[in-house]
Image: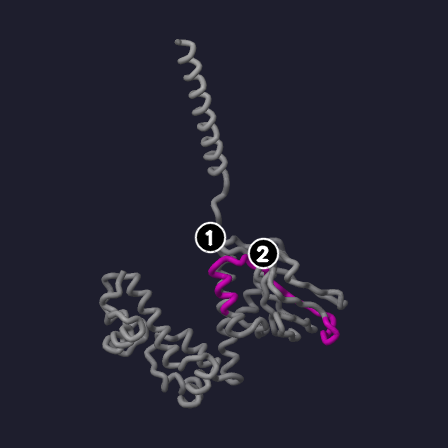
Amino acid sequence: MMQTIRDILQVLTSFFMGHFLIFYMHFVICSLMPPPTVFPDIRLVRREIHTTRAYQWDNRTRPPDQGLVIQRTLSGSCGFTCGNSSTEVHPGQAMLFRHGEDSHYGLTADSSLPYATEYIVMDPQAGVSELFEGLRSQYGPVLRMETGGDAHRLLLQLLSEFETGRPADRITHAECIYRLLLSLHREQGRDTRRSDPVAYGRHLLETRCREHKNLKEWCTEIGISREHFSREFNARYGESPAAFLRRLRLEHARSLLNLSTHMPLEDIAALSGFASVQTFHRAYKRHYGTPASKART
């Protein structure tokens, strides 16, 4: 009888010791592993020169979501195909693509040689990816990146770091990535002022929606009549500029309502660009179907 009890205790001890060792080893391994980084990384910044038309890349052959690329032309030109659209990327322009997508670039019969380029490959993290795709969806995959502009100066700064083998820390790189993408956004909007006043107007409304201006005042700054702007904007984007501006302001106001249970509605209205709290109340209820005063979480 006593031998049986000893056998049972030995089996139980072996069982629990085995599981304890597994748990302990898992704990030790996890404690030794570095924590996942929250900072977007720059994988590569490089300058290249190509003199033959053998330079070809099909992004479908690359592992998906392994990199977001901004590739600027220094001299010559390079063909770029994205979906059904093809174009030559000339000096002062940059093509934006991601690994794994249906796009291709290389030196075609129409390309000018030699082709000199400088490019950056970034991690496709959430915030960076959204800014990157926002640029492409609003302005297309080929953008202007003027020599000496803010975006270009940031690219040259990073290029110098990588060429000398002394890259900055990842926090600094994360800041540079966001500044680079935001500078490109600003540059595209500014460049459309004369060539495409409707796109420039949308850029102004989107980036400065919280300013206390009505549509007439915006059109004066854009340099276009209110009637023409409204007609062309609606035809292109499927909603009126007034509705677009109101929607952006309401989205901002709603985020403030969710953020704070104590901020007065008058302050929320003012911070969101509404001329008065009464205007805000009417617009909010019409858009969301519930009074703003009952919308706090």
Name the secondary structure under disc 1: loop
Give 105 or 183, whichever is nearer the viewer.
105
**Residue 110 - label:** none
Question: Relative to residue 206, is residue 260 depicted above or below?
Answer: above
Percent position (x, y) of residue 228?
Answer: 44, 89
Give 59 or 156, whichever is nearer the viewer.
59
Report whether residue 259 is seen: yes
Question: Relative to residue 261, is residue 227 depicted above or below?
Answer: below
Q: Please report the residue visible at 45 percent of the width from the left and 24 percent of the height from the top.
A: 15
Q: Which residue is mark 1?
A: 38
Q: Please report the residue visible at 36 percent of the width from the left and 86 percent of the height from the top.
A: 216
Question: Relative to residue 67, is residue 152 depicted above or below?
Answer: below
Does 129 lie within the magenta span? yes
Quarter of the view holding residue 70 = bottom right
Percent position (x, y) of residue 137?
Answer: 52, 71
Q: Amino acid at mark 1?
A: Val
Name the secondary structure under disc 2: loop
**Residue 66 - label:** 2
Relative to 285, 63 lies left or right: right
Could you give the CA–CA distance between mark 2 and mark 1, rounded to whole angstroms? 16 Å
Give 219 or 293, whichever is nearer the viewer.
293
Span of residues in magenta = 108-134
Q: Please report the residue visible at 48 percent of the width from the left and 80 percent of the height from the top.
A: 199
Percent position (x, y) of residue 238?
Answer: 44, 79
Percent position (x, y) of residue 135?
Answer: 51, 70
| First in sequence: mark 2 vs mark 1 | 1
**Nearer the viewer's eye, disc 2 or disc 1?**
2
Disc 2 packing (10 Å; few <14; some 14–19; many ≥20): some
The C terminus appears in which quarter of the rendering?
Answer: bottom left
Q: Amino acid at mark 2?
A: Gln
User: So how many labels did they put on this image?
Assistant: 2
Does 184 lie within the magenta span? no
